[in-house]
Image (cartoon, rainbow, N blue to C red):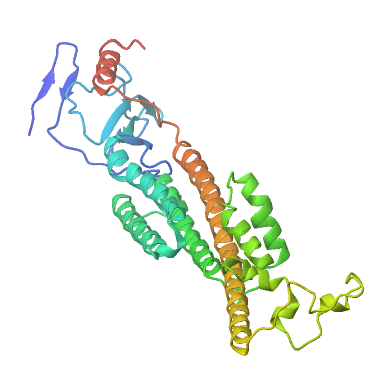
Amino acid sequence: MCNVVINNLGEMLWVPPAIYKSSCIIDVEFFPFDEQTCHLIFGSWTYNESEITLEFAQAEWVDLSEYAPSSIWDVMDAPASLVNKRSRIEFQVRIRRKTLFYTVVLIIPTVLMALLSMAVFFLPTDSTEKITLIISVLLSIVVFLLLVSKILPPTSSTIPLMAKYLLLTFVLNVITILVTVIIINVYFRAPTTHRMPSWVRIVFLRIMPIFLCMRRPMGARNEGKKKKKNGLTTFPGVGAFSTNPTMHHPQCPSAFEKSSLMPPGRSKESNPFYYPLSHQAIEAIEAIEYITQHLKKDEEYKMYRDDWKYVAMIIDRLMLYVFFGITFGGTVGILFSAPHVFETVDQKERLQRLIHLYKTGNV
C-alpha cells in the first residue's frame, strides 16, 4: 500500500511501489551493432477514452534521474506521446547495444580466423599440414557459430550480421578445403600418370606467372637442356668417343669412310682417329650409353614433375589473392554495413541531456 498525495488544487499523486517488466521485439539484423526501440504503453483497464484523459506533468520524456546505467545497453532516447484520444501514454525507449565485449570476444577472433584460413596457401604442398590447418580453422568457426546461436534469441525473420560473416567464413573455408585437395593432387602428378595439356602449360607456366609477379628459377631447366643435348658429356673421357661412330661399332663400315667428304686415296688405316676397340671396351661404352639414356629419362621425368609442382604453386598464389580479395571485401561489406559501427556513445552525457529535457522540456 502507498499513500496518495493531494494538494490544494485537487491534484493527486499516487506512486505505487511496483516494478514493471515488459517484453520487447528485438531486431537482430545488425547484431552486435543493433539498436532497439521498446514501446511501453500505460493506460486504464477500467475506464475508456471518453472517461479518462491523461496529460504530461512536466515534459514529454521519461524521467531518468533514478536510472542506473547498464553494462550491456546505452539509453539513446526516451520520448513519450499520448495515444488513443489521450487515454493512454506510450513511452519509446531507444537503446543501443554496447559492442566492446562482442568486438573483443567475437568479431576480432572471427576476422583473425578468416585471415588464418588464407595462410594455408603459404604452406608448402608437401608439408602435409595444409588440410590439418584448414580443418582446425573450420572447427573453430563452427564453435563460434554455436556461440552466436546461444547469445541471440531464436528467430527466423532475419539473419544477424555476425551470423552472415561467420557463414561467409565457413563457406570460404569449405571451398579452401576443396581447392587445397585439388592443389595437392596437381602437385603430386607425374608424367607417367598425367600428361600436361598444352593450354595448362601456356596459361600456368607462361601467362599466370607474369600477372602474379612470380619468376621460376631457370638454372635447373637450362642445365637439364644442356644435358639432354649430349648425355655422354657428363662422363670424363667419353665425349671424344661419342663423336666417332667407328669407335662404338668397329666391325661396321665407317660412316666417315662412306662420306663424300673423305679425301680420295685415304682409308681407315690412314685415319688418325680410328683404332680397334676390345670387346670389353665396347661393352663398357654400351653400358655407359645405357646409363646415360637412363639419366636423361630420369632428368626429363624430374623436369615434367617439376612443371606440375610449379603449376600447383601458381594455383596456390592465385587462390591466395582471390581469397584475400573475397575475405577483405566480405569483411568490409558485411561488418561495416551496420549503421552505427563507428559511433561512440557517452552514456553519462546523454543521460544528463535526457534528464535536462524532462525537467525543462526544452530540446
Depth check: give the residue in front, 275 or 290: 275
- Examine the rendering and report whether any part of residue 355 can be seen: yes
In the picture, which quadrant includes the C terminus?
top left
Q: Residue at x 29, y 19 (%)?
A: 350
Q: Closest to the observer: 131 or 110?
A: 131
Residue 292 is drawn in which quadrant? bottom right
Q: How many marks?
A: 0
Q: Is residue 38 above or below residue 116?
A: above
Q: Is residue 159 visible?
A: no
Q: Is residue 311 left or right of residue 73?
A: right
- Residue 275 position in % (x across, y down): 70, 79
Residue located at (49% from left, 42% from top):
328
Residue at the image point whose x is 28% and y is 35% from the top? 100
Quadrant where the N terminus is found in the figure: top left
Q: Which one is nearer the viewer's eye here, 201 or 156?
A: 201
Figure check: 128 above or below 90: below
Where residue 191 sits: x, y (%)?
A: 61, 73
Q: How far across and how far down the image is residue 200, in percent? A: 68, 62
On the rendered structure, is 319 left or right of 47?
right
Query: As drawn, is 123 to the left or to the right of 185?
Result: left
Q: Judge from the rendering whether residue 137 lies leftward or rightward of residue 254; answer left or right.
A: left
Q: Quadrant of residue 306?
A: bottom right
